[in-house]
Image (cartoon, rainbow, N blue to C red):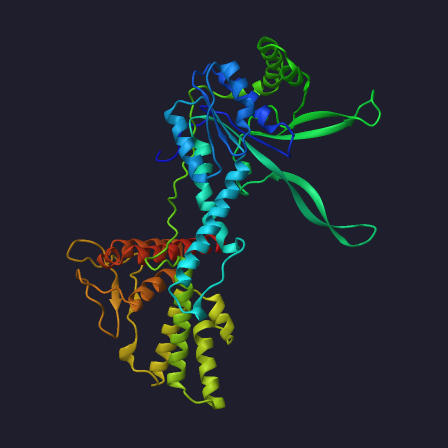
Amino acid sequence: MALLQTLGKGQGHLKAGFLGFQGSGKTMTATLLAIGTRRHFGLDGPIAFFDTEGGSEYVAQLIQQFTGQELLGVRSRAFDDLMKTSLECLEAKVSVLIVDSVTHVWRETCDAYLKQVNDRIRERNARVPADRRRGFKTSLEFQDWNPLKAIWQRWADWFLNAPLHVIICGRAGNVYHMEKDEESGKKELQVVGVKMKVEGEFGYEPSLLVEMDRLEIPDPHRQGRFLTRRVAVVKKDRFSILDGADLEIDSAPLREALQAKTPEQATAAMAVALAQTMDFFTPHLARLTPGAHATVDTTIKTDAGVDEDGDSAYARERRQRVIACEEIQGDLVAAYPGQTAEEKRAKTDLVFLGFRTRSWTKVETEFTGAELRASRRKIQEELVRRGKLDAAVLAPALRIPPTDEAPSVDASGQAVLIVEAVAPSPSTGPDIEITAELLGNWEDALITAPDQTSLATRWAILQTSAAFKLAGAEVQGTLMAIRERRLVEMAGAA
């Protein structure tokens, strides 16, 4: 087996995410989870904190009390600093990395991209006349998102595959949707959900995603006063152990820790808060497999068929269709240049002969480049029969031997295509020229195969020919795509 392998060996590292509005308890809960994770797995390394809003200073002492080590970290919002910090964490054998808040990093990435775009515009404007200068961008546009997402994907891939426990915090944002008011009949913008304010797909990456919420509950003992309750709701747990579970966080231990008169009292109070947090999250941690490291191959491997000019297979096919249609029109106009009723009818009859339709729009939009070339051949042959076209300009016609006929063999002992043409056929030597006409004939041979057996024979002959091997990856890929399409068509017809 080249790709298939045995799965189910376990995932060994926590990938958690917290989202919430201000004051919901993201930083403190993430910190307690980081301390608990380090303790649960018996890790010796320090905890690291990528700090974008100064929150690390408020939990550094707590982390030192429970781990016996100073908190390591970086205070920055730059994407490049986040990536460098992530790699340094692996080198420093950090036990858990906290990123708070990833929202700032995403915004910095967007702002940096916009600034660099405007810097390039400024440089260009300094070199060109005033009438050719471009205005500066004030915001990102649709075409900017693809390169931005490609930049951000570097962090997403690292987060997913790094052999490190990582906890991220992100600010929450409302999800809006236009809904019709039943009473007024007018459409109004309604809040329909909450999501993390970060690149749109990154919210899918954490294996444990927790939404933090701050609730204000009327105090039953003091009229007009409210009690604060913080709630952690598990939005996603890939183990499905905690999925949908919620934890109402008792803030009394935190208050006692802040009001404690001695370090011992503060530590004891925080130990209660830590125990409360870990009692809730331990079922997820218990499902992780220490030492396991299940990575996802995120390298880009798919051949998109892009040529040296940057054109995709679709763009090339579209261009070939345009060229083929123009060539057909050129043949028709050259044969019947006038606009008389008789000449117009002759041209539409030829179109019908080649395509079984008199709609030129259908010809332009519903036929592939190979089908257009094959039909052009039919039209050209009819023009030769009518004496309207010199036979010498015809492209070579390709004949494939039937399945019970052995193909011809070249000097190397390989099967070759048999080419019968009015015009001289190309040489089969090393300096063979793969012309558009020859390529068209190869495509026609595959398209006109009556069944799968015939198609298989034609493909085997083509694939082993010297000309095919010299044709290059682009031509070979085009022919392979036609073969696959014909197989699908034949399977559908069956």
Quadrant location of residue 392?
bottom left
Residue with the most extreme left position: 411
- Left or right: 408 as drawn, with respect to 119: left
Image position, residue 365 (x, y; %): 49, 67
Instruction: Using the rendered image of the protein, determine whether residue 164 is visible from the camera's viewpoint.
Output: yes
Image position, residue 287 (x, y; %): 52, 20
| Number of numbered discs visible in the structure rendering | 0
Instruction: Using the rendered image of the protein, determine whether residue 286 is visible from the camera's viewpoint.
Output: no
Residue at 37% from the left image edge and 44% from the top image edge: 301
Residue at 23% from the left image edge and 69% from the top image edge: 425
In the figure, 180 relative to 49: above or below?
below
Image position, residue 41 (x, y; %): 48, 16
Out of 444 and 97, give the one closest to the viewer: 97
In the picture, the quarter occupied by the N terminus is top left
Out of 234 and 199, give the one closest to the viewer: 199
Out of 168 and 427, give the one closest to the viewer: 168
- Left or right: 307 as drawn, with respect to 419: right
Residue at 40% from the left image edge and 36% from the top image edge: 297
